[in-house]
Image: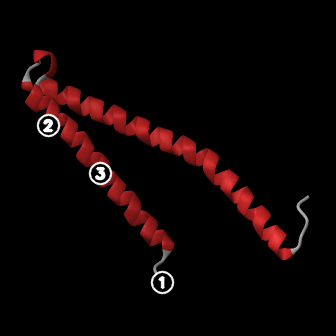
Amino acid sequence: MQNPLVRGVAFVNSLLIIRFAFILLLAASGWYLRPFELADKYAAAAGLLCGLVISESVVQALLSVMMVAIPSFLSFRAQQVQRRSGMAWV
């Protein structure tokens, strides 16, 4: 059986690679499409900035969901364990 910490690290690394690829994709799209008829460098910088903002907002949303979901799951799990062991929930 694999160590769960090692598996979790690999999962986080793959997410970082996906985020980095997404940011580069938006920068390349900005360079190629040239929104608002910007120069190449400025369009790529605008795409890069948009990619960073979107990527960080997604991470913040996931973190806020996890901050609510994990404690509620843990308390629910503790209740299940106590019911199985015959201890009353105080």
Q: Is residue 3 above or below residue 74?
A: below
Q: Is residue 71 left or right of residue 27?
A: right
Helix, strand or loop under label 3 = helix
Residue 53, x across and y down, in percent? 35, 32
Q: Which residue appears at 25% of the width and 40% of the height? A: 23
N-terminal of the pair, mark 3 or mark 1, is 1
Q: Which of 58 and 6 lies nearest the eye of the viewer?
A: 58
Helix, strand or loop under label 2 = helix
Label 3 and label 2: CA atoms lie apart by 15 Å
Q: Is residue 25 above or below residue 1?
A: above
Residue bearing mark 1: 1
N-terminal of the pair, mark 2 or mark 1, is 1
Residue 21, x across and y down, in percent? 23, 47
Q: Residues within 10 Å of mark 3 (few under 14, many from 20)?
A: few
Q: Amino acid at mark 2?
A: Ala
Residue bearing mark 3: 18
Q: Is residue 27 left or right of residue 86?
A: left
Q: Is residue 59 left or right of residue 50?
A: right
Q: Residues within 10 Å of mark 2 (few under 14, many from 20)?
A: some
Q: Which residue appears at 55% of the width and 41% of the height? A: 64
Q: Amino acid at mark 1?
A: Met
Q: Is residue 56 above or below residue 19?
A: above
Q: Amino acid at mark 3?
A: Ile
Residue bearing mark 2: 28
N-terminal of the pair, mark 3 or mark 2, is 3
